[in-house]
Structure formats: C-alpha cells, structure tokens
Amino acid sequence: MSDHFDVLETRPRQERERDFFSRLVPFLTQALLDAPGLQRHLAGIEPRSLTSREALARLPILRKAQLMEMQAEDPPFGGFVPAKALRGGRVFMSPGPIWEPQPPESDPWHAARALHAAGFRPRDMVINCFGYQMTPGGFILDEGARAIGCTVYPAGPGNSEAHAGAIAALKATAYLGTPDFLKVILDKAAENGTDVSSLNKALVSGGALFPSLREEYQERGIAVMQAYATADIGLIAYEGRADDGSVCPGMVVNETVLVEIVRPGTGDPVPDGEVGEVVVTTLNPAYPLVRFATGDLSAVLEGESPCGRTNMRLKGWLGRADQRTKVKGMFVDPAQIAELLKRRPEVSRARLLVLREGEQDKMLLMVEGSREGDIRSTEAIAEALRDITHLRGEVEEVAPGSLPNDGKVISDERKYD
C-alpha cells in the first residue's frame, strides 16, 4: 500500500537520524530544567554530547520498576512531569501502580500513523473496545482515530452482545481493541443473528495476534493489522501492507521515537537480528522518557519494508525480558502473585501458567501448600486471583514440593509462531 501518512515515512534513514538527534539536544536541555526527576536520573549528563546512537547508549537505562520507586518517593510522577504539561489534559494510572500524563496536543500518543497504515480513513465509523477507565489505552487509539477524521464509539471492553448490537446499529466499519475480543464479539453476533458485516478492518494491540486468528478474521472479511504501543510511550511500531495488499514482515518503528534493542539486564545495544529488550527514547515534553526499557523482547529486521516505509523494523513481540506477562490486554506481574501469597497464607508456593485455549488467553494458577491438606478451597484462591489481577483464572492444587524450583513465577506457555 503506497499511500503513506506523510513524507516522513519515506525519507532516507540518515536524514531521520540527523533530524532526531538535532531535536534531542534542545529537547533534553529544556527537559532537565522542567523535570527534576529526570535531572536526578541523568545527573552529570551534558545534552550537547548526545549527537549519535553511540553517545545515547552511554546514558543509563530507565526501568519501570525504578520509575515506580521514584513516583512513590515523589508522588505522583516522580518529578518527571512538568506541572504546566498537565493543564487541560488527563492523568492515568496503569497497573503497578504507575501514573502517566496525557500530553497536551492532538493525537498526543501519535497513533494516527498506525491507523492510517491499517486503512482507517475519515469515512470510518470506529468501535473502540480498549478500556477508557484509569489507563490511557482507550484514549491512545481514540485520539488517533479522531485525528484522522474517523467517528468513534467509545465502547470499552465488556458486554459482547451490546457491542455487536452497536456495530449493527451504527454500521461500524472498523474495530479497535485486543485481538481476542474481536472474535468474542463476532461469535456472539453469529449466535444471536446480529448483522456485523459492515466491519471490514481492525487495528489490534495489547496482545499477540496469532496467525490462525488473523486468517479467521480474513475469512470473515476483516483485514486486521497490529500496532505496538505502551501506556508510557504511546505508539512504538506498527504493521504495513505492500501494494498487493499482503501484510509486510515486521513492524515499522514510529517516526516520533528512537528505538534501541539492548541486551536484557544491561544498556548495551545488540547487533541487528539479535533478540534483546526494546528501549525507547521519546521527545515528549509532558513525559520526557530517555532510554526507557519497555521489558518487551524483539529484534531488528534488516532491510526496508515492502510497504515503502524506511524506518527501522522490529520482528514483532518476542516475549518479555522479565516475567511480567500480558493476558487479555492486561499485564500480570510477579508482584501480584506475591500479593496473593500474602492474602492466602495456606499457599506456600504458586506458579501462574498463561495458556491459549480456543483462540483465547487462559490463566491457570498452580498452587501448593507446605503439607497435604493445607489448601482447603481453590475457589477462594481463584477469587483472590481475580481480585488482584482483575482477570479470571482457574486454580489447581499440586502436591507439596512438586513445582519447579527455578525462580519462575509466571510461565507464558502460549506459542507465538
């Protein structure tokens, strides 16, 4: 698909790099004055020296756990958000908890580019099934779609029957949400005889789009594309299509960020093609994150995309550098399993398996007591799991001492090939 969002997508890579670093120096100079938390984190750094990837790689990595600690010490933002940036905007809280601001501009998370690549146009009526409560997920795509000129129905997740009815009534042409939830809506519509045939395109995020699921959607007449975004950064990368309509390999990095792939646990960039952790630098004056480690694993896909976009390509989501795992669009953290152990002292050890069943994510919590008979109610443990993670999961008791002693609390058993 040769129709691009703007000329920035097809410029030479060298020009893109020069432009980014020419803007990074004045941006960081001002950000260090406006954001005392960033100033403490980058103490002693001279912005004028940051003129290349090699110079940038000498800066320390900023990890989400560090940012959470800084926010706890200096609430709510750890000194990373200038007060003037909040005027007229929104504030969000993502799981962690961690606080995030909304930048004060149209399409503040720069999602419109991914929507355009997925075929969204001003004529589209969009049903947005990302959440609008507390976290920025729904607003990230909502703002991008409206910046293009789409009309948006802010559905959020939840009642699939009501969602199917809304698609039929509005003649919605496009879907935004997690990959799995679209199937839930389509299956409910088929069950009830609700006409949702107006849907012809979708942009999904918040979970893996498995090949079998993409094929099923294609058979139902819906062209589905993926975007990679986080609450902290916004849009990081997205899929494109070639002139023949086929989905191009990999995901093209957004024009508004600079991405590095580093060896997990370090800040050292790895050679192209090697799997490592995704680290992002963004020129966002409301939330100046420099070398922010996402915790996601990926690799650079060499060469340019057949869609004509010339920016770096990522191979896609290849897992987590930590054990934090996304289930049905929401992160589940080892700290949450630790919280469950505190609430249910009869459980001495636990291991959460994330599985794939019937094109849906599933959680199975394996628990053991110190002795046989310690665990009296797996239903009570399942209730605690739901209360802590806001997700349903099954609980299975295993014999004391049977769980592997390998330090793993969350095990993602899904197959992504």
Image (tube, rainbow, N blue to C red):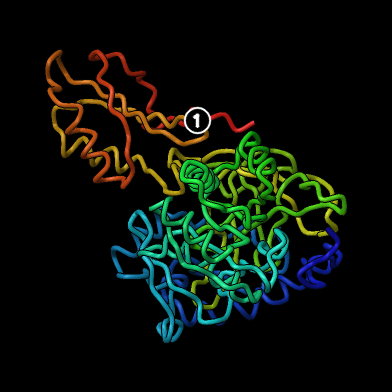
Instruction: Answer yes or no: is residue 341 visible.
Output: yes
Q: Residue at (36%, 58%) from the top-left corner?
A: 68
Instruction: Answer yes or no: is residue 305 visible.
Output: no
Expressed as whole percent of the image width and height from the top left, the position of residue 103 reads 50, 77
**Could you say which quadrant of the image residue 66 lies in?**
bottom left
**Could you say which quadrant of the image residue 405 lies in?**
top left
Q: Which class describes the residues within 10 Å of circle 1: few (<14), some (14-19), or many (20+)?
A: few
Q: Is residue 331 rendered to the left or right of residue 7?
A: left
Closer to the camera in the image, 196 or 147: 196
Q: Residue at (14%, 15%) from the top-left corner?
A: 371
Quick check: 334 above or below 51?
above
Expressed as whole percent of the image width and height from the top left, the position of residue 52 reads 73, 64
Q: Residue at (60%, 63%) from the top-left corner?
A: 281
Q: Can you identify the residue that label 1 sits on?
A: 358
Label 1 secondary element: loop
Q: Quadrant of the C terminus?
A: top right
Q: Is residue 337 rendered to the left or right of residue 245?
A: left
Quick check: 396 above or below 205?
above
Q: Is residue 77 rendered to the left or right of residue 269?
A: left
- Give the residue type at disc 1: Gly
Expressed as whole percent of the image width and height from the top left, the position of residue 380 reads 17, 33
Q: Quadrant of the N terminus?
A: bottom right
Expressed as whole percent of the image width and height from the top left, the position of residue 60 reads 53, 57
